Image (cartoon, helix red, strand yellow):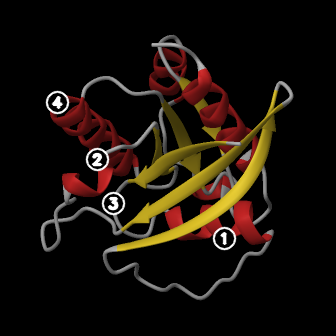
Amino acid sequence: MIQKKICLIGVPAVGKTSLVRRFVEGLFSEAYLTTIGVKIDRREVEVDGTAVRLVVWDIAGDDAYSPLDLTYLRGAAGLLLVADGTRPSTLNRALELREAAQEAYGPMPAVIALNKVDLESDWALDADRVATLRETATVLETSAKTGANVEAAFDALARYTLKPS
């Protein structure tokens, strides 16, 4: 079996932990618990007949009080950039974190998860900006609450980690 380390990065409260919990356990909780450091989970997926064990690193949110510790990303095969669709600034920061990660460790596959799509009335991301992002990246609108596109985001990232560089 192939094993791949993937890391979720973004600012606090975008839903990183909730996405992991939905993906690994199939559960969602309204209770908000701040991640301290990193939480590691595992789940096996199949990509074109190949078994892949994803080692999912849910890294504490990046903010002014606790900046992302890039050493957590060492050895990562891919990144899930998580942004909150109700807070456009979170997308900007997720993209900045991707740049910092690539400066530190070189190019790596990434998928952008625009989370909280279930909050339609609060959605604040500009549709044109999202369309432009889709021209160069895999962008999925996800909901840890409903499960929308959660499997698809992790499956896409797993697939990208298996492609030759």
- Say which amino acid is labelled 2: Arg
Q: Is residue 100 above or below residue 121?
A: above
Relative horizontal placement of residue 9, taking residue 84 as reference (left or right): left
From the viewer's side, name the closer residue of 93 and 119: 93
Residue located 45% across and 13% down the image: 165
Q: Residue 41: which quarter of the image?
A: bottom right
- Say which amino acid is labelled 1: Arg
Q: Which residue is mark 4?
A: 103
Q: Under tag 3, what secondary structure?
A: loop
Q: Which residue is mark 2?
A: 74
Q: Nearer the viewer, mark 2 or mark 3?
A: 2
Q: Position of residue 162 (x, y in %)?
A: 60, 25
Q: Which residue is mark 1?
A: 21
Q: Is residue 128 visible?
A: yes
From the viewer's side, name the closer residue of 139 and 51: 51
Q: Position of residue 7 (x, y in %)?
A: 44, 51
Crowding at dot 1, Cα within 10 Å, few <14 / some 14-19 / many 20+, comes out as some
- Say which amino acid is labelled 3: Val
Q: Which residue is mark 3?
A: 11
Q: Is residue 118 visible?
A: no
